Amino acid sequence: MLSRLLDHARRIIFAVRHRGDRGMSTAEYAVGTIAACGFAALLFKVVTSADVQELLVGLVNRALNVGK
């Protein structure tokens, strides 16, 4: 009886130790959301800069005029 109990306890411990994380906890979710918002703000700032806009407009114009 004791060996069955110990065996059951070992299986539970093994299962708990080897289960995968299935998503983020609330704190991790909050940090991930803040990081994503920060990255989005940085990307927006870069894309709306004059130099990058000029490059993007030139790229689109070249792409539209390829067959002409």
Image (cartoon, rainbow, N blue to C red):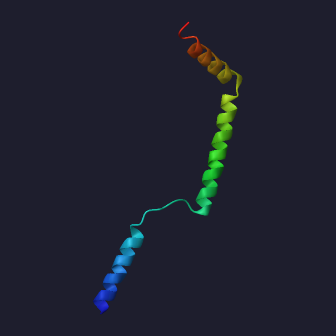
- Where is residue 34? Give x, y as percent: 66, 50
- Where is residue 8? Give x, y as percent: 34, 82
In which image quadrant can residue 15 be found? bottom left
In which image quadrant can residue 6 be found? bottom left
The quadrant in which the N terminus is found is bottom left
* Direction top: furthest residue: 68
The quadrant in which the C terminus is found is top right
- Disc count in the image? 0
User: Relative to residue 45, is residue 27 depicted above or below?
Assistant: below
* Direction front: furthest residue: 67
The residue sitting at 64% across, 35% down in the picture is 43
The residue sitting at 38% across, 77% down in the picture is 12
User: Relative to residue 60, is residue 37 depicted above or below?
Assistant: below
Relative side of 11 to 41, left or right? left
Relative side of 28 to 9, left or right? right
User: Relative to residue 58, is residue 47 depicted above or below?
Assistant: below
- Where is residue 59? Give x, y as percent: 59, 18
The residue sitting at 43% across, 63% down in the picture is 20
In which image quadrant can residue 2 be found? bottom left
- Where is residue 40? Give x, y as percent: 65, 40
Relative side of 59 to 14, left or right? right
* Direction bottom: furthest residue: 1
User: Relative to residue 40, is residue 61 depicted above or below?
Assistant: above
The residue sitting at 30% across, 87% down in the picture is 4
